[in-house]
Amino acid sequence: MTNFAVIQTGGKQYKVSEGLKLKIEKIIGDYKVGDKLSFENVLLVVNGDDVKVGTPFVSGVKVEAEITDIARYKTVEVIKYKAKANYYKKNGHRQPYFEVKVLAI
């Protein structure tokens, strides 16, 4: 059995295990590459055959992670067009994210 946890951050839920790199929503605040993050909102912890499910969170459990990159996703283009009405609008959006490496559960 593998050891993993399910955390909640940025309105989303992620399944994480030690050593995993994942991209999460940018967290408001002054952070830089190399900073440590601690996720307190742990919904589920699996350690071998031992399973702990929170109501809604598991108490006393934290997931430690380190920021490895701060960047933005590729451009998502939003186009609005109406035929025969001379109407065309084009916008672009780049969502910022943190890439984190999980250190410990």
Image (cartoon, rainbow, N blue to C red):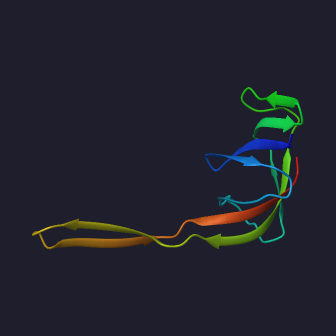
Image location of residue 24, percent across then percent down: 67, 58
Q: Residue at x 64, y 64 (%)?
A: 97
Left or right: residue 10 compared with residue 36: left
Report the residue that reaches farthest toward the left: 84
Q: Which residue lies furthest to the top in this view?
A: 55
Depicted 52 relative to depicted 22: above or below: above
In the rendered image, residue 74, in percent from the top left (x then y), is placed at: 53, 72
Q: Which of 13 and 56 is in front in this view?
A: 13
Report whether 67 appears left or right of 50: left
Instruction: Please give left or right for residue 54 compared with residue 90 in the image.
Output: right
Question: Above or below — where is 105 with respect to 74?
Answer: above
Question: Which residue is drawn at the image coordinates 72% and 29% (left, top)?
Answer: 56
Quadrant of image for the N terminus:
top right
Q: Which of the 4 image quadrants contains residue 103? A: bottom right
Left/right placement of residue 6 relative to residue 51 reads left
- Name the residue rendered at 86%, 53% in the picture: 18
Residue 54: horizontal and vertical position, in percent?
77, 29
How many numbered discs sit on the rendered protein? 0
From the top left corner, tell me how far across and down residue 22 is, in percent.
72, 59
Which is nearer the eye, 16 or 92?
16
**Residue 25 versus residue 44 in the image, above or below:** below
